[in-house]
Image (spheres, coloured by chain):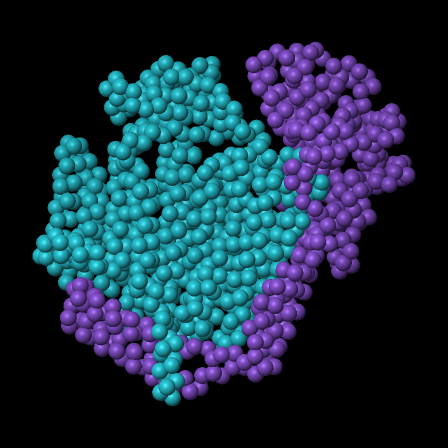
Chain colours: A purple, B cyan
Amino acid sequence: MIFWIVAAAMTAVVTLAIVWPLLRGKGGSADLAAEHDVEVYAAQLRELEGDRDRGAIAEAEAASARAEIGRRLLRASERAQASSAASGRSLGRPIALAASLFTAIAVPVLAFVLYHEVGDPKLPDQPLAFREQPKPQGDDFDLASLVQKAEARLKTNPEDGNGWEVLAPIYLRMNRPADAVTAYRKAIELNGPSASRFGGLGEAITETASGEVTDTAKAAFERALQLNPSYLPAKFFLALDASQEQRAGDAETRWSELISQSPKNAPWLQIAQAGLADAQQRLGKPAASASAPAAPAAGKPDESAGEGTDGFKGPDAAAMAAASEMSAGDRQSMIEGMVANLAARLKDNPDDVEGWKRLIRSYTVLGKTEEAKTALGEARRSFPADSAAAREIAAFADEIGLTTGAEATSR
Amino acid sequence: MIVEIGHFALVLSLSVALVQSVLPLIGARTGDQRLMETGTIAATGGFVLIAIAFASLMTSYVTSDFSVLNVFQNSNSQQPLLYKFTSTWGNHEGSMLLWVLILAFFGSLVALFGRDLPATLKANVLSVQAWILTAFLFFILLTSNPFERLDPAPMEGQDLNPILQDIGLAIHPPLLYLGYVGFSIAFSFAIAALIDGRIDAAWARWIRPWTLIAWIFLTLGIAMGSYWAYYELGWGGWWFWDPVENASFMPWLAGTALLHSALVMEKRAALKIWTILLAILTFSLSLLGTFLVRSGVLTSVHAFATDPTRGVFILCILCLFIGGALFLFALRAQSLEGGGLFAPISREGALVFNNLFLTTAAATVLVGTLYPLFLEVVAGKKISVGAPFFDLTFGPLMVPLLFAVPFGPLLGWKRGDLLGAAQRLYFAAGCALAALVCVLAFTGGTRVLTAFGFALAFWLLAGSLTDLFLKAAFIKAGWRTGLSRLLGLPRSAFGTTLAHFGLGVTLLGIVSVSSFQQEVITTMAPGKTIEIAGYTLSFDRIDQRAGPNFEAQAATFSVRSGGVEVARIESSKRFFPARQMTTTESGIWTTWFSQLYLSLGDPSEDKQSIVVRAWWKPLVTLIWVGALIMGIGGMVSLADRRLRVGAPTRSRQRAALAAGA
């Protein structure tokens, strides 16, 4: 509300300031250009004398220059005389009123309409200080400085396995996956293998590869499962790997196994159901999990099935799994960060059809229909209306049941 | 809320700019004072609004508000406070916002200080200024909005590009933009004159100070950028003929030409049409520079500006303004009134000579910059046009120009005496000859080109002082009268001398460093020593340090001369984890005007030793000192009382006219 008051006040002040001179009754006459010319030529004559005194111009040339300027001066003052009679003319009141009406309408309307298009008035500022306040760990809790202290400790005592183990997931959360890989490796080396350490290592490697489960990551997850056959995060990533490599049969088994073993409120359930539906559709079976509301969102194979590895992957999925060990709030911000990464990447490189589809799907899976629509709109704008890419995006939007309202009807 | 207030202010400024594009123009056409006056208020109000937007973005950066996408992508909560400020324009969106802020700033300057301008000229200028503003505000809001949001905000940002985490970012872009964008005023004046179909005498008075302001900032901005690249990139070079550098150098060359032709126009009312064309071309080159840097068509050391889709938008703006301006010029140029007459050998003639060479040089740089792009588009081949091309083309163009510089101020207006001027330059010629002989003697007669380079530099240095010395007439009138005459000279004479002297200083630095630079590249382990330029450089130790958002490997060297330690140099490599990038911090020791420059390469495989590059750069700082002197010369010239003459006695005149009627 305060925002709207401030915005309205700014608009009002600016509009009034512009309109003010228009309403101020009869305008004074415009000063005449010819009068200015007279001034300037007179000044030129004065400077010419100065130049002559300093010897910058010879006597004969100075005389002819004086004549030149004098002629112009004469002409200018004649013009000034002539037009001073006609001066004082100004447009009638109707035109000034029309101009003020135009300003008074155009400025606010344009500003508010455009702002409505691009602005986000309900979103409050979220400065760092504000974001860190609700942390329960104490008054002066500062994640970054804690990390720095831990790093300093590990520098002097690099054999402290517990230190690495604590630091590793924090690195993952801080968007430093390469450091997380090192930390998990150290933790495994010093504290011995465990399912969670290998699982974490796999997640970290996956994140360094922008969400793709690489062979190294896969090996780590398999090791984690050897150590603890019911370690669900590892199962999630192996299923994800199957989806990414489009081994549909394998993916179907893995996803359904994961779903059956997961608790009802597991954070990865939506993704898992989407992955299952994706795999089933690839196999030509009807999607079984229609009951899950988000499932159809990602439930269609990509159009580029022939291209190989570009199937079901993305930071959203990786983030989901990485988030499995976090508290609810942290998880949410992590996921948002990953999706934001993707959105940012698309901003730099909007030609990526698959990327756009991934982003839109991520938003739908997260239940952010508005953002999904915005992303869809942006994706459409990124390609010429009649290009193959635009058609692909449109088809994709239809599949997941998403329209951008006005835009959709106009097409 | 601060973010959205800023966002709204930016949008509002666009609608104000739209009004400003129309109303003053109509006012000027119909002669309505009230409509013309709206331009003044709209320009000032628009500037305040954009300033609010900029301040709000800066606040987001300082408080690390990662709910703003731009802040999240380009800063980090661990950055030192200064870099949180500078991050604001260390990225595409923010720097475009700075661009329009400065554009609006110049517009408001015209609005506030243009009281003495003829009202129609002022109104037209403000409208044209608003056209540019509107185009770029649309560009920002539609393709590069810095206020795009993220909800909820991520915990940590992605950090500013480490190369940009330097005090240089605080100074270089604002200076450069003040220069780039400052030429928009000259452009707006030119377009206003073409719209009106006539050039007021006041026009010429006004275009020069504005050009001068822009030129000063551009000169300092380019020099600052050059020094920044010199110490930050660790390559030891001070100019790379990189397209981004050329992008700022082309408007500088054209702007320097404009500065000189505006002088002729102001004093002698000659070269009017040419000056208008030059004003258009200079700002066109500024726009071209903005396009080259902002569109991402280049991939170079300034790798931080890349986005292909935006390029099309800027290209449209570019075509609209350059094409439109040239079209208008073609339409109206014939109907403009010509000016004063002059003989070929005269001050005017010398300034035409200057213009000829400077614009040709600008064209050369333009070809060298655009040809590789053109070839890439047409033939798909990627070539690079580097120093060899520019040495062969740009260099030879500069030699006659630099040789002619001392003659210019000594020639009389309208008709000059070349022989007389040459005779008065005997002292400068003596200095040049002495330099030539000295260098030849020192190098055993092997470095003839170098010797001529030094001679040219000293010719410029002594030649630029000759003018003042003669005008004061020390020899004829004695020291005391001479001194009082010297102090009585107009400030623009000092400005000319300083600017030309600065050029000589820069040239001296360039010649010296390109001829007598010494370079040693070797792998060194702690404890080893090398010899360079008579100094013994020993590698003392290497240690790890932790910075606020980076880790550094710092190598310490001690410099000994004749066994006595004269300095310690520290050079380091910094690793920034947030971006996974390494930067080189060169170690520089300055003694007088020369520098010893150290930078670290990669460590050897066994980590026992590291590649060390050491340069001895004689008189290298003169390159930037000279640019600084040029800038100061510009400021002195700007302070000249003459430039303030416009219409100070207007009311008196008006009264006289009224009495006459």
Residue at the spot x=63%, y=24% of the render? A146
Residue at the spot x=41%, y=42% of the render? B225
Residue at the spot x=12%, y=52% of the render? B479
- Residue B441 lies, in percent from the top left, at 13, 34
Above/below status of B399 relative to B657: above
- Residue A380 lies, in percent from the top left, at 69, 51
Above/below status of A282 relative to B355: above
> How many discs mark residues in the rendered view?
0
Residue A230 visible in the picture: yes
Residue B332 visible in the picture: no
- Residue B512 lies, in percent from the top left, at 25, 37
Nearest the viewer among A57 and B565 is B565
> Where on the picture, by quarter, is residue A365?
top right
Residue at the spot x=69%, y=31% of the render? A211
- Residue B635 lies, in percent from the top left, at 33, 54
Nearest the viewer among B481 and B556 is B481
The N terminus of chain A, quarter of image: bottom right
Nearest the viewer among A13 and B23 is A13
The C terminus of chain A, quarter of image: bottom right
Report the side of A192 relative to A24 (left or right): right
> Where on the picture, by quarter, is residue A238?
top right
